[in-house]
Image (cartoon, rainbow, N blue to C red):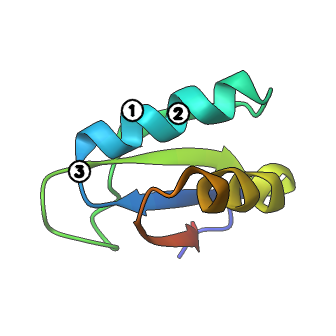
Amino acid sequence: MSDSGHVVILVHSTSHAVRIERLLTARGVPCRMIPVPRHLSSDCGACVQVAREYAETAHEVVAASGIEVQGIVPV
């Protein structure tokens, strides 16, 4: 595992990733949708990448949104 200073928010669908990206952007959290890193899952899909300094805020936004996530994982 590399230490790039980011976390990824793993979700169940691309539409959830899009919604989370919009919510985070609205809160001023820099983020972007990326493909799920292969070392985390071999499934096709998208996740949302956030700098580690914003991980706590991202967790709060996700929790308040009610969107079910698979996890928030450092990469």
N-terminal of the two: label 3 or label 2?
3
Q: Amino acid at mark 2?
A: Glu
Residue plotted at (21% across, 50% down):
45
Secondary structure beneath label 3: loop
Q: Amino acid at mark 1?
A: Val
Q: Is label 3 in contact with label 1 (beta carbons under 8 Å)? A: no
Which residue does the numbered mark 1 point to in the structure image? 18
Secondary structure beneath label 1: helix
Which residue does the numbered mark 3 point to in the structure image? 13
Q: Amino acid at mark 3?
A: Ser
Q: Measure the alpha-carbon separation of dots 3 and 2.
A: 13 Å
Secondary structure beneath label 2: helix
* Label 2, residues with CA under 10 Å away: few <14, some 14-19, many ≥20: many
Residue toward you, 1 or 49: 49
Q: Quadrant of residue 17?
A: top left
Residue plotted at (53% across, 76% down):
1
* Label 3, residues with CA under 10 Å away: few <14, some 14-19, many ≥20: some
Residue plotted at (80% across, 26% down):
28
Image coords of residue 53 (percent x, y): 86, 53
Q: Quadrant of residue 68?
A: bottom left
Q: Is label 1 in contact with label 2 (beta carbons under 8 Å)? A: yes
Q: Measure the alpha-carbon separation of dots 1 and 2.
A: 5 Å
Residue positioned most to the right: 53
Image coords of residue 69 (percent x, y): 42, 66
Q: Is residue 75 left or right of residue 44?
A: right
Residue positioned most to the left: 43
